[in-house]
Amino acid sequence: MALSGFEGFEKRLELHFFGDDPTILKLGLRKLDFDFIQQTLEAVQCTVVSAVGNSYFDAYVLSESSLFVYPTKIIIKTCGTTQLLKSISPLTYFANQQLGLTLFSCRYTRVANVNHHMNEFRSKWKTSNSSNHSHYDMSSNTVNACKSYPTNKNKSSSYTIEICMTDLDPTLARNFFRRPYDGKTGDSAGKEMTELTGINEIKKEALICDFAFDPCGYSMNSMHGEWYSTIHVTPEDGFSYASFECIGSTDDDNVNIVHMLRKVVQIFRPGTMSVSTTTKSFNECNNEEWTRVVAGAVENMGFKCRSCAMDHFPEAGSVVFQTFSALRRKSG
Ligand SMILES: C[S@@+](CC[C@H](N)C(=O)[O-])C[C@H]1O[C@@H](n2cnc3c(N)ncnc32)[C@H](O)[C@@H]1O
């Protein structure tokens, strides 16, 4: 934990539900009322600072990261001393009572001992349905990324990429500090940071909901159809950290994954980073292809791959983890 008491590394919870009523399933969990969401977040110890929605899902920027609500899926990321697991019980209870939805799977990931760069990774995935109960538990001492899985099992082309970056370039990190007495709101200062840093160029056609904290710190969610990306930045020297996560599909011709990875790296120029890629495929060639794509994108930007690991989860798909460190930092 940083001296300030603030720890940027996120914990992540993903809940999947199912139900029988097609009229309810159209909006599903998006019908949970806002007061209830706020009360649940209060128990977790964070609040909503900004929100946006499209026809597929709602995205909330939180004081401590993000919340995404789809008709049958909820993803919450929080950091610091938040108590994320306290949201499970109210969410499952109200989803059941108000909407007749039943919890199908629950996944929680967190990174431990980050301030000592122990890179310890813990992941728990629990799935259940009427015929089958299973529990997967994975740990590794070489990885510091969280992983997630796309909801729609029919979309084998969907992927999740998560990047955890530490030791941000101090000059670039300064872009995420507000000027004293700037007279701006969190929203307008956030928009300015989005444009100044080039975050708006990662996925040009996406709708962005951004927020700048005072005196520093930045969060954004972006929506593009059913896909999202999210960035959270802790720019303070000594414990600087930024995370990027996106869910997308390789069928989406508008997305150039290499461009996206390079742009993210350019915006932060971290000293170290881990990249975690999750896909539905169980095919080893697919994993090797992802490994090559990610390494190819960042290695010619002055990064060296320090470790690479792959794993398969019967209910979830494949995960590739790669860690990189900067060979030397370019100035400016
Ligand atoms: C962007 S927020 C959200 C945390 C996110 N998980 C991350 O990785 O950074 C964290 C940054 O905002 C700053 N900050 C300022 N006011 C804050 C507040 N009221 N709540 C949370 N973070 C705040 C923190 O010092 C830190 O630099």
Image: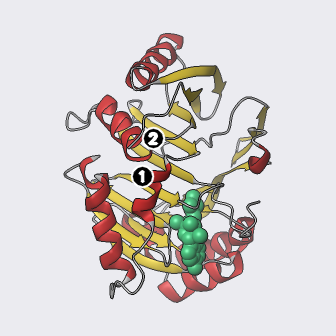
Give the residue displayed 33% in from the left and 40% down from the top.
263
| Distance between the alpha carbons at the discs numbered 2 and 1 | 8 Å
Give the residue displayed 77% in from the left and 60% down from the top.
1
Residue 179, quarter of the rendered image: bottom left
Give the residue displayed 65% in from the left and 28% down from the top.
314
Q: Is residue 213 visible in the rendered structure shown here?
A: yes
The mark nearer the N terminus, 2 or 1, is 1
Q: Residue furthest top?
A: 285
Residue 250, quarter of the rendered image: top left
Q: Say which residue label 1 marks.
A: 172
Determine whether the beta carbon of the residue marked 1 sits less than 8 angstroms from the nearest atom of ligand 1. Answer: no
| Secondary structure under the numbered disc 2 in the rendered image | loop
| Secondary structure under the numbered disc 1 in the rendered image | helix
Where residue 271 appears, x then y in whole percent? 56, 37
Amino acid type at circle 1 is Leu
Which part of the image, by quadrant, shows the C terminus? Answer: top left
Residue 316 vs residue 261: left or right? right
Q: Say which residue label 2 marks.
A: 269
In depth, the one of 24 and 67 nearer the eye is 67
In depth, the one of 4 and 93 nearer the eye is 4
**What is the crowding at mark 1: few (fewer than 14 residues within 10 Å), some, or many (at least 20)?**
some
Question: Quick check: 66 above or below 183?
Answer: above
In depth, the one of 146 and 7 nearer the eye is 7
Question: Quick check: 218 above or below 318?
Answer: below
Residue 186 vs residue 323: left or right? left
Amino acid type at circle 2 is Arg
Where residue 193 appears, x then y in whole percent? 33, 64
Pointers 2 and 1 in contact (C-beta within 8 Å): yes
